[in-house]
Image (cartoon, helix red, strand yellow):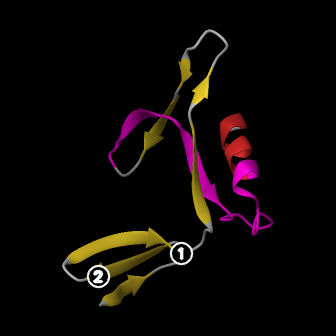
Amino acid sequence: SRVTLGEGSFVRLVRDGRWEYAERNNCQGVVAVIAVTTEDQLILTEQFRPAVGKIVIDIAAGLSGDEPGQQGEALAMSAQRELLE
């Protein structure tokens, strides 16, 4: 039985059976891009993440439809935007 424990502007806290987790409530999907150069090298991003208080290395990724004017954006367009970003 799924129960909403709390909800803010961007995150909803949910209990589903014995599991508790957070989910985004202002987006339509998530995208991730594994970018590879013509020399078969991976392109990674490096950015500060407040949740861990450190710089992390990851792949280009982000939310789809979370910004004004991007509602209904195709996931392929979101992925392209994230890669350029």
Q: Which residue is mark 1?
A: 25
Name which quarter of the figure residue 27 lies in: bottom right
User: Hey, which residue is sitting farthest left in the picture?
Assistant: 18
Number of other residues with Cα within 10 Å of mark 2, as a class: few under 14, some 14 to 19, many 20 or more: some
Q: Indicate left or right for 58 with 84 as reference.
A: left
Task: Residue at 70%, 63% (x, y): give it.
Answer: 67
Q: What is the three-letter code of the residue carrying label 1?
A: Asn
Task: Residue at 67%, 46% (x, y): give it.
Answer: 79
Name which quarter of the figure residue 49 lies in: top left
Which corner quadrant holds the N terminus? bottom left
Position of 72 relative to 61 (above/below): below
Which corner quadrant holds the C terminus? top right
Position of 6 relative to 41 (above/below): below
Q: From the top left corner, tell me how far across and down residue 26 is, in percent.
A: 59, 72
Asked if the stretch drawn in magenta spans residue 49, the answer is no
- Please report whichever mark, 2 or 1, sits nearer to the chain's N-terminal start: 2
Q: Which residues are magenta?
A: 52-77
Q: From the top left corner, tell me how far across and down residue 58 is, in percent.
A: 46, 35
Q: Indicate left or right for 34 with 73 as reference.
A: left
Q: Nearer the viewer, residue 37 or 21?
A: 37
Q: Which residue is mark 2?
A: 15
Q: From the top left corner, tell me how far across and down residue 47 is, in percent.
A: 49, 35
